[in-house]
Image (cartoon, grey):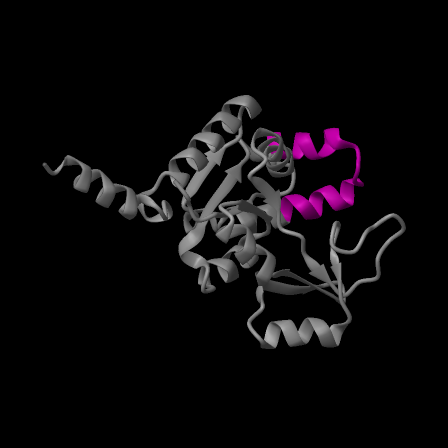
Amino acid sequence: MDRTGLLIILSSPSGAGKSTLARRLIDWDDCLSFSVSATTRPARPGEIDGQHYHFLDRAAFADLVAGGEMLEHAEVFGNLYGSPRAPVEAAMEAGRDTIFDVDWQGGQQIRASALGPHVVSIFILPPSLPELERRLIARGQDSAEVIAGRMEKSRGEISHWAEYDYVLVNDDLDRTFERLTAILTAERLRRERQKGLGRFVKRLMEGEQP
């Protein structure tokens, strides 16, 4: 049966495993894809417009926001970032799911949009703050000062856990991934997401009549 695609919001503090889980979801099912964000920052070497980002000038970005064509948007370090609505709607109609790697503020905006009823929001928690800090250190990407800033920010992000439909504690990556795929499988089967279910039941009932 046809179904309506989902908007899957994944949020977590840095280091909790969100990006790894999102990549595994993409490998798990080719009906899943990442939302390609729009930005006003210049493209970096090797970045391809429409693949890594939709690169826009500020006027074009502002026009999309004014026309309600951004599901969420924010300004970060002087550049605008946002999630265009049209590609997500096209994916939904084709029965494809879109993954959004956004923070709690972006998640709030998407849930408040016209596409909110199609959102499944999932927050990934670390098993403990010391473990979160250990993971950040083990990545070897940031200075001690940057890690301290990320840890401070993580407390604010975690405080919004109750706004999400599902909350998973990522104490074991494989087990967390299994739970994540179980959530998506169940959400895809919700009655209201199966577009052809009413027609199927109607034919079923008519076939049972003498």
Left or right of residue 164: residue 78 = right
**With 205 as the anchor, is 48 left or right in this view?**
right
Question: Residue 60, position in %: x, y?
Answer: 72, 73
The residue under the point 64% across, 42% down is: 14
- Image location of residue 133, percent across then percent down: 66, 34
Where is the N terminus found, in terms of image quarters? top left
Image-quadrant location for residue 2: top left
Residue 76 placement (x, y as % from top left): 71, 62
Q: Is residue 168 left or right of residue 52?
A: left
Choose between 139 and 97: the one closer to the eye.
Answer: 97
Q: What x and y, as percent, mark residue 51?
A: 74, 50
Residue nearer the viewer, 187 or 101? 187
- SS majority, magenta: helix
* Res 204 → quadrant: top left
Is 210 in the magenta?
A: no
Q: Which residues are magenta?
A: 131-152
Q: Is residue 145 left or right of residue 14?
A: right
